[in-house]
């Protein structure tokens, strides 16, 4: 891409120089000769014409070059930022893998102790199980991103009841939310007679799961709400929380990859910053879009829409 831009710029500059020069020679001579035929005057005018052309083309080339260099610097800055985020991402992945792996290996070793009580064994097994689940989620996100990059992910549309889906996820995460002292409610439902939609249920569940886990993860108290409604031919899903919120300067790129890895909270909260990027990609595959409203310290509300398809087409 960089070579193509360079090629076009160089040829554009050359073409502009030749065209301007030819036009200047053709028309300036005719204009001057229309006013005078004095050889001395014409000789002086030729000198002034040369200086004028040099100044004008110099200014134009400066403007062209400035614009081109600005684009190159922006591209360079984006490339450096991408490399920096990837480096932070890899460091965070290393941390996210080591932490549960150390727990699995450590408590597996402790389980070899024959003097452990049944309660202790159960406690250690629970820790190993949760650590394994944490690693599996990490691997699933990395695999999902890889498949999205290579176009290996396809959609499988089935008839899905959106109300039942929301109620199921509410039941699944109610206990987890309550254990953190959070109130978890269903804010709204679609009309009961219009709650069925043809969509990829697995991807829809994945998106809502990512949003709910984030809401619970980043909330210390308050309320979490999940809801679905039917509006203008689209099902609108929303997940709202009273958590830490998102800084204003990060809202614009919150759906980009590796963003979570770039914040200081990445060590305090589990995750590698791929969930929202994956969710956005899935929603777009389903023909929808996602938005976020958030204020730092006051919570966030993620809203996405998918077409209300009543038939498979």
Image (spheres, helix red, strand yellow):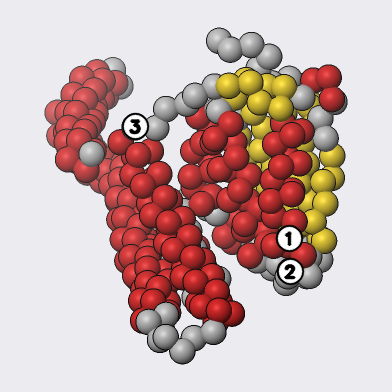
Q: Which residue is label 2 attached to?
A: 179
Q: Are marks 2 and 1 in contact (CB under 8 Å)?
A: yes
Residue toward you, 154 or 74? 154
x%, y% of residue 192?
A: 84, 25
User: Viewer-proximal residue, 150 or 32?
Assistant: 150
Q: CA distance from mark 3 to mark 2?
A: 39 Å
Please tell me the numbered disc located at residue 49.
none
Query: Residue at label 1?
Result: 175
Query: SS for tag 1?
Result: helix
N-terminal-most mark, 3 or 2: 3
Task: State the CA–CA distance, disc 3 to disc 1.
Answer: 36 Å
Helix, strand or loop status at disc 2: helix
Of residue 130 and residue 211, the one placed in the foreground of this image is: 130
Residue 179, quarter of the rendered image = bottom right
Q: How packed is label 2: few (under 14 Cα within 10 Å), some, or many (20 or more)?
A: few
Task: State whether residue 191 appears in this view.
Answer: yes
Q: Which residue is drawn at the image coordinates 82% and 51% (left, top)? A: 185
Percent across and percent down for residue 276 are 54, 50
Pair 3/1: label in front: 1
Please state the horizontal and vertical placement of residue 131, each as a whole percent of the image: 47, 68
Q: Residue at x 20, y 20 (%)?
A: 26
* Contact between labelled residues 2 and 3, with CB atoms less than 8 Å apart: no
Q: Is residue 45 left or right of residue 222?
A: left
Compare marks 3 and 1 and give the one earlier in the sequence.
3
Q: State how far apart marks 2 and 1 are (Cα).
A: 6 Å
Q: Which residue is mark 3?
A: 151
Q: Position of residue 67 (x, y in %)?
A: 35, 46
């Amino acid at each position: 891409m960089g070579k193509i831009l360079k090629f076009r710029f160089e040829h554009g500059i050359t073409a502009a120089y030749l065209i301007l020069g030819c036009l200047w020679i053709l028309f300036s001579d005719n204009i001057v000769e229309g006013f005078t035929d004095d050889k001395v005057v014409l000789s002086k005018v030729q000198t002034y014409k040369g200086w004028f052309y040099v100044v004008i083309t110099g200014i134009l080339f400066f403007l062209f070059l400035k614009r081109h260099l600005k684009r190159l610097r922006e591209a360079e800055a984006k490339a450096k930022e991408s490399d920096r985020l990837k480096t932070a991402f890899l460091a965070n992945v290393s941390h996210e893998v080591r932490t549960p792996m150390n727990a699995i290996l450590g408590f597996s070793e402790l389980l070899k102790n024959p003097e452990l009580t049944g309660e202790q064994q159960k406690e250690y097994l629970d820790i190993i199980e949760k650590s394994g689940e944490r690693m599996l989620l990490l691997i699933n996100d990395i695999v999902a991103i890889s498949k999205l990059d290579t176009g290996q992910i396809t959609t499988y549309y089935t008839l899905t009841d959106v109300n039942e889906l929301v109620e199921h996820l509410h039941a699944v995460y109610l206990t987890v939310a309550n254990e953190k002292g959070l109130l978890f409610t269903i804010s709204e439902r679609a009309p009961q007679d219009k709650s069925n939609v043809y969509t990829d249920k697995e991807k829809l569940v994945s998106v809502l799961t990512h949003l709910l886990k984030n809401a619970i993860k980043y909330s210390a108290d308050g309320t979490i709400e999940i809801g679905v409604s039917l509006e203008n031919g689209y099902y609108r899903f929303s997940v709202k929380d009273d958590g830490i919120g998102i800084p204003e300067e990060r809202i614009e790129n919150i759906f980009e990859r590796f963003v979570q890895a770039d914040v200081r909270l990445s060590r305090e909260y589990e995750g590698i910053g791929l969930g929202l990027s994956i969710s956005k990609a899935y929603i777009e595959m389903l023909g929808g879009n996602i938005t976020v409203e958030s204020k730092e310290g006051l919570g966030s509300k993620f809203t996405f829409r998918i077409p209300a398809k009543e038939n498979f087409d």
